[in-house]
Image (cartoon, helix red, strand yellow):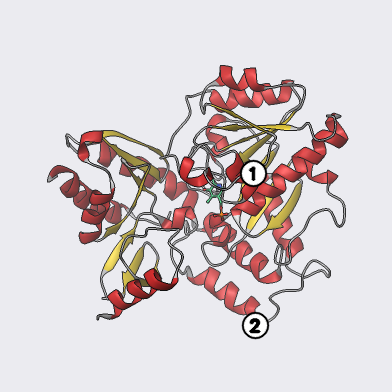
Amino acid sequence: MTETADLIATEHKLGAHNYKPLDVVLTRGEGVHVWDTDGNRYLDCLSAYSAVNQGHCHPKILAAMVEQAGKLTLTSRAFRNDQLAHLYEELAELTGSHKILPMNSGAEAVETAIKAVRKWGYEVKGVAENQAEIIVCSDNFHGRTLSIISFSTDPDARAGFGPYTPGFRVVPFGDIDAFAAAITPNTVGALIEPIQGEAGVIIPPAGYLAGVRDLCTKNNVTLILDEIQTGLGRTGKLLAEEHEGIEADVTLIGKALSGGFYPVSAVLSNSEVLGVLKPGQHGSTFGGNPLACAVARAALKVLVEEDMIGNSERMGAYFIEGLRQIRSNIVKEVRGRGLMLAIELSPEAGGARQYCYAMKDLGILAKDTHVNTIRLAPPLVITRDQVDWALERIAKVLTTA
Ligand SMILES: *Cc1c(COP(=O)(O)O)cnc(C)c1O
């Protein structure tokens, strides 16, 4: 057996089958590229679901990680460390948030926000005990914990895992009237992705988020935007909320907060919501650890210093224009914002996965989502030449079908 086939067989035998990855075994990454065990090079058009916005193994983030790993990695929050305050300061300066709570995975940031906003509902808004409701959207993706999948509308994510956590009200994404109708005196929060990534890069109608913002303000509802995927430059702005000129009360970030080196997430708050958490009421052994903080500081620094957000806006516009010029009878729609792009194929195309395999054979790694959609989200450091290189190959795959 070849090394590659061996590794795949071992994964299959010993690992739980909760993923169905493309059969490419990666061993090295640099910038927008990754290499497999056979030495083939690929353009990474997934970026680990936007965790690697800064490009693979960014040398400055790597240096910060190595330096901090040799000094101090974990203290727990029982003691203080000399990195956390700096991360707070830099995040506050960058995002304008007043209170920050560091966690590890994205799902933990979501859980933290749910806990905080419920408590805020009882202690500040005056909702009766255990009556708090949070509005969420259909086709949402906010992570994999039990409370989060309790309000998923994806049967794969939800079915068989009950009993479910109550207290959530699902409304259709993008429908402002449905959102308004779902608000009750017990509504403490609304949890929304500004663009739904896992659902297939679904952009809500113009004005929707501004309308949601307005309704939340008028009804004393905390607006929580999950920017774990859309944030940190992916859509061509630091945060996707900027496209609508609004500000969430609570913003969740993760993924690219570490540039892919380490799980780091954070709850950013510009309201009194995080203030309700008192010592002992919430925490995490690894949350806010010095290694995570040093890595996150470097990841944020290069994002800004190397103008990755501006590059995302420019290369995103160039990429989507190129995709729209591809004449193919299997493309139903091309959509996206910044470098968060998707090609939706017509149902007759027979599913996106085979096209992802065809792209892989030409040196591009992309992931199908929701059967008919190919998501394209390369690292934000991609150049015009690299976009041209990708367009040529994507066109070949979509027109020789
Ligand atoms: C990835 C993602 C999460 C969950 O993050 P994990 O680190 O996988 O727990 C939550 N929300 C959105 C929008 C995401 O894309």
Decide if residue 233 is on the left or right side of residue 330: right
Instruction: Please tell me whether residue 333 is drawn above or below residue 278 in the rendered image.
Output: above
State the residue at coordinates (87%, 56%): 279
Q: How far apart are marks 2 and 1 (CA)?
A: 45 Å
Look at mark 2 in the image and give the residue it sits on: 70
User: What amino acid is labelled 2 in the image?
Assistant: Gly
Q: Where is residue 401 in the image (x, y as percent from the top left)?
A: 14, 44
- Tell me which corner region of the image, top left, top right, bottom left or bottom right, holds residue 67: bottom right
Q: Element under label 1?
A: loop
Instruction: Please tell me whether residue 59 is drawn above or below residue 253 in the rendered image.
Output: below
Question: Comparing marks 2 and 1, which lies closer to the viewer?
Answer: 1
Decide if residue 88 is on the left or right side of residue 213: right
Callout 1 crowding tier (Cα within 10 Å): few <14, some 14–19, many ≥20: few
State the residue at coordinates (21%, 39%): 349
Total marks shown come to 2
Q: Position of residue 94 (x, y in %)?
A: 65, 49
Specify whether residue 123 is in view: yes
- Tell me which corner region of the image, top left, top right, bottom left or bottom right, holds residue 76: bottom right
Decide if residue 244 is on the left or right side of residue 341: right
Closer-to-camera residue (181/236): 181
Decide if residue 258 is on the left or right side of residue 37: right
Callout 2 crowding tier (Cα within 10 Å): few <14, some 14–19, many ≥20: few
State the residue at coordinates (86%, 29%): 126
Look at mark 1 in the image and give the residue it sits on: 163
Specify whether residue 94 is in view: no
